[in-house]
Image (cartoon, grey):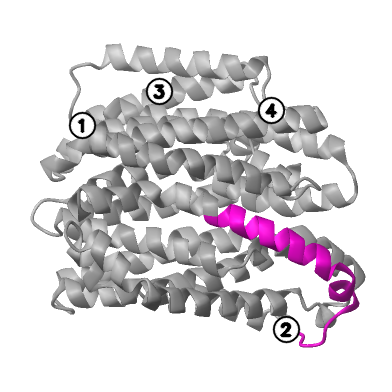
Amino acid sequence: MSQIRRQSIISTIFVYLGFVIGFINTYLLTRQGFFTESQYGLINIFIAVGNLMFAFANMGMTSVMYKFYPYYNDNLPKKKNDLLTWALLISVIGFIFVIIAGFVFKDLVIKKFSVNSPEFIHYYFWIFPFGFSILLFSIFEVYAWNLKKSILTTFFREVLFRALTTILIFVLSYKLIRSFDAFIKLYAFTYGIVALALFMYLLLKGQLNISFTISRVTKKFYKKIASFASLIYFGGVVYMIAQFIETLVIMSVIGTAAAGIFALASVISGLVQAPQRGAIAAALPVLSKAWKDKDHIKINLIYQRSGINLLIASLGVFLIIWLSYEDAVNVFHLKPAYLQSKWIFFFIGLAKIVDLGTGVNSQIIGTSIHWRFEFVSGMILLALAIPLNYFLVKQFGIIGAAYAYLISFSVYNAIRIIFLKRKFNMQPFSVKTAYTIVLAFIAYSICYYSFLTLHTFSGILIKTLVFFALYGGSVIYFNLSPDVLPVWKTIQKKSGIKKNV
């Protein structure tokens, strides 16, 4: 557990560093007099559609890599490990099919999006290199996770990618490139640089093993791999569509500018979800090996600790943001239109808390013998998300997409909790779950009512620090997580607050 804790903490630090850079980018992209709402929306559409391309192209290979890597690693010398070779080959073939589909269905895309989102149509083919780069990076990323390099991959994904975007924004600001057209075309290759950086690292470290000889492990497990990959693939596509269906529906029904407003709320709500990224990267290899070794005690321990740790973190981040959301929009002089994102963030943020508070249930199911259930639950999610988004966006506008997100992901997580409880008698909750929620809202209420008249930058800072002290102090005092106190003691020791006796 100490290994998972260490990697999760350092990865989370990089995630938040990435978010700091991301918020600088968001500020530059949404401030008055620079980028339009439609242009900001288009940048986020690249991310949404690029991730959908990855979902369709990867053919389940990312999941195959973390599920079967222990079998390859334990039974083959490194030079004969052909898992990465097959993952790359099959994924590239998958992307070729994506390109073909892109040409075949182009007229349908034009029909659906040309009226309200003409910018998307204009840069349609520039999204393909962006999506291909996400695919390559994701393959190398999962491979690096299995090599216990999750901290490095988090740095590349969360920090380097956003830093490249920052560079592009400043290059445009200083007229080194003279138009948004040039900006967005260069942006299409940013993830390619990130993928190349990770590839070069693995290559230079001698850890990039490519073998074109079919190994005995592949011969033994290829039927299981094919069966696993097919269902996980469709489940992954379903999940990714459910993740980004809001943006696509808003683009089609309302327009790119509205997608930009929704994107701001989504970006900020990403702060709430940030701790999950490091936890997943650190936990996946451990869970996969624990299932192989039939170590249910370790799996249950990871489930429970991830649930309380991620709940503590997500609730704290959500309430800090909610304390000053409107003040931040005004203080940083974002366009007034972005005030519409406040309640969108509220409902998406609640959905993120639900998702994090239920621990790494998806990863536990995905690495177990019941991985087929991931496909079933994903289908339920999609069956809820598509109609809910369409009808609620039609009925309520942009906020309807946030309602749909909260409803669909709450049902999705409830189904997975029930499944794990019935199959393995595992569940992520304890009495400390309730204590965490109560203490968080007590700390929020004290800050809210104590600083009602503070709306300046200093007010934002004061509310944040006071809430952090009240909430963080309560978590430590009541020892709500077995992982918090060791971290606090390490901070005390390294900072000199408390001398090591």
Whichever of labels 2 and 3 marks the residue nearer the N terminus, that label is: 2
**Does the rendering let one see residue 260?**
yes
Seen at 82% across and 67% down, the residue is 223
Residue 327 is marked as 1
Counting other residues with Cα less than 10 Å from the Cα at mark 2, is it few (<14), some (14-19), or many (20 or more)? some
Image-based side of 118 in relation to 227, left or right: left
Q: Residues within 10 Å of mark 1 (few under 14, many from 20)?
A: some
Residue marked by disc 2: 210
Label whose residue precedes the other's in the sequence (3 or 1)? 1
Q: Please tell me which of labels 4 and 1 falls first in the chain.
A: 1
Give residue 19's position: percent from left, percent from top.
40, 50
Q: Mark 3 belongs to which amino acid?
A: Phe
Q: Residues in magenta?
A: 211-237
Cα–Cα gap, marks 3 and 1: 16 Å
Q: Earlier in the sequence, mark 2 or mark 4?
A: 2
Contact? badges 2 and 1 (CB < 8 Å): no
Label 4, label 3: how many angstroms apart (C-alpha)? 34 Å
Q: Which badge, 2 or 1, is on the more N-terminal residue?
A: 2
Eye-nearest disc, 2 or 4: 4
Label 3 CA crowd tier, 10 Å (few <14, some 14–19, many 20+): many
**In the drawing, does residue 76 fall left or right of residue 347?**
right
Distance of label 2 from label 3 (alpha carbons): 51 Å
Name which residue lies at 23% across and 57% down.
40
Measured in 3D between alpha carbons, the distance from the residue under mark 2 to the one under mark 4, in whole angstroms, is: 41 Å
Q: Secondary structure at mark 4?
A: helix
Q: Residue furthest left?
A: 33
